[in-house]
Image (spheres, rainbow, N blue to C red):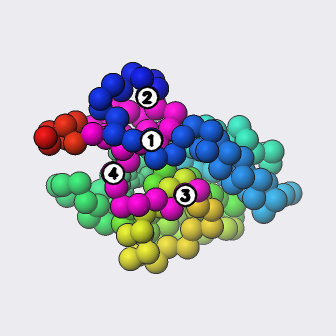
Amino acid sequence: MDAADMGKDLLSVLIPEHELQDKIKELSGQIDADYDGKDLLIVGVLKGAVMVMADLARALHVPVQMDWMAVSSYGAGTRSSGVVRVLKDLDTDIADRHVLVVEDIIDSGLTLSWLMNNLKSRNPASLEICALLRKPDAVKVPIDVKYVGFDIPNEFVIGYGLDYAERYRNLPFIGTLAPHVYGGE
Ligand code: 5GP
Ligand code: MG
Ligand code: MG
């Protein structure tokens, strides 16, 4: 899927494909350097992190294992509640492992802060976060994110794994949606 397939549904391209791919290369270089000689487990948070996991994993030179978690925030509405349910847990025992959590976006940070506490209780050797995108609201919940791709404005974005009503995940760029898609004017 690309911009042409979206017709009038696309409002703007916020981060084009080549910028995403350049950033993935940059992040993978840092991760390679930091985990040199270590045994790394990267954990993707489903479903949004699928694209960044796939591209990051292929850009990395250090050997990695890949695992996945699926979590969902309780509560109605579009705001994260901070109460999280594990829909799919890790297959891997992370005790004494070097773990890097890979996220699509940090908005309020509530989901990730819950997840980090959950993973910490399993006693990994180290635990860090790589998030492709971060919104300014994220600073309200203190989370130490070691690798951040882009700080973006407080807008709802889609593409490169991120959905609106399960659509647009397969766009190769990050964009914003025209108001009529949300049922606006
Ligand atoms: P948080 O708990 O940090 O507020 O957000 C958790 C989840 O909400 C993210 O992992 C992501 O799935 C979703 N989310 C937050 N902001 C956006 C956005 O701008 N676009 C999309 N598609 N999902 C978002
Ligand atoms: Mg996510
Ligand atoms: Mg979503």
On the image, the x and y values in percent for residue 90 come to 52, 49
Q: Which of the two discs, 2 and 1, labels the residue nearer the N terminus?
A: 2
Distance from the alpha carbon under mark 4 to that under mark 3: 14 Å
Mark 2 residue crowding within 10 angstroms, few (<14) / some (14–19) / many (20+) = some
Q: Which residue is drawn at 63% across and 62% down?
A: 147
**Which mark, residue 3?**
2
Residue 132: x percent and y percent? Answer: 54, 53
For the residues labelled 1 and 3, the Cα–Cα distance comes to: 14 Å
Q: Distance between the residues labelled 2 and 1?
A: 8 Å
Q: Mark 4 points at which residue?
A: 156
Query: Which labelled disc corresponds to residue 13?
Result: 1
Q: Which of marks 1 and 3 is in front?
A: 1
| Circle 4/circle 3 CB separation < 8 Å | no
Q: Magenta stretch: dominant SS? A: loop
Q: Is mark 3 on a helix, strand or loop?
A: strand
Query: Which of the 4 image quarters holds residue 27?
Result: bottom right
108 or 119, which is in the foreground?
108
Q: Which residue is drawn at 36% across and 26% down?
A: 6
* In the displayed structure image, the side of residue 99 where residue 78 appears, left or right: left
Q: In this view, does 20 lie to the left or right of 125?
A: left
Magenta region, residue range: 149-178
Q: How crowded is mark 3: few (under 14 residues within 10 Å), some or many (20 or more)?
A: some
